[in-house]
Amino acid sequence: MILRSANCPTEDKSVWDGKGDVHFKHLATRDNMYDHARIFAHITLEPGHSIGDHPHNGETEFYYITRGEGLFNDDGTMTTVYPGDLCETGHGAVHGIENTGSEPLEMIALIVLDN
């Protein structure tokens, strides 16, 4: 199966009380992932926008940074992230990310269920 980029559903919304809106391009649905994952998306954060801090229980979330830079909350440790970095959060840990750069921060987000 091939899903063309132009056919991927998109949405803009505030996430976990973060600043501004987050742009989502959903790359697959939960059904496409056979209930092993719940989000697989290309995410864009404009400068100053963020995904608020939140926990992950019963699942693990990965952010693969593809463009820009941001400040990543890794369960209370703040770290600057750059293209090529992979952020992982699961097992009750808390994370969030803010675009601290001057260009859009883009990343691939994947939430895998612990099944």
Image (tube, rainbow, N blue to C red):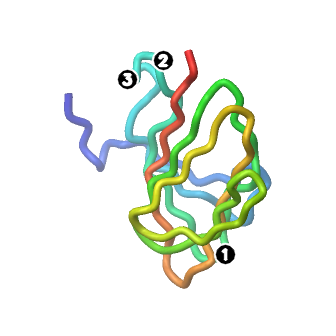
Query: How far, Cα to Cα, is label 2 from label 3?
Result: 8 Å
Query: How far, Cα to Cα, is label 2 from label 1?
Result: 33 Å
Q: In this figure, which residue is indicated by the disc labeled 1?
A: 48
- Could you tell me which quadrant the N terminus lies in? top left
Q: How many marks?
A: 3
Across and down, in percent, residue 52 comes to 74, 55
The amino acid type found where label 2 is placed reads Asp
The amino acid type found where label 3 is placed reads Asn
Using the image as rendered, state which of residue 6 and residue 81 is in the foreground: 81
The answer to whether marks 2 and 3 mark residues whose Cβ atoms lie closer than 8 Å is no
Circle 2 or circle 3, nearest the eye? 2
Q: In this figure, which residue is indicated by the disc labeled 2?
A: 35
Q: Determine whether 89 is above or below 71 in the image.
A: above
Q: What kind of element bears circle 3? A: loop
Across and down, in percent, residue 21 comes to 65, 60
Q: Residue at x 66, y 24 (%)?
A: 58
Asked if residue 43 lies left or right of residue 91, the reply is: left
Task: Using a 10 Å C-alpha cutoff, classify the residue at mark 1 as few (fewer than 14 neighbours), some (14 to 19) or many (20 or more).
Answer: some
Q: Furthest residue to the front?
A: 77
Q: Please report whichever mark, 1 or 3, sits nearer to the chain's N-terminal start.
A: 3
Task: Using a 10 Å C-alpha cutoff, classify the residue at mark 2 as few (fewer than 14 neighbours), some (14 to 19) or many (20 or more).
Answer: few
Q: Residue at x 45, y 39 (%)?
A: 40
Q: In this figure, which residue is indicated by the disc labeled 3?
A: 32
Q: Residue at x 58, y 54 (%)?
A: 12
Across and down, in percent, residue 14 comes to 70, 54
Would you identify the image quadrant in which residue 101 lies?
A: bottom right
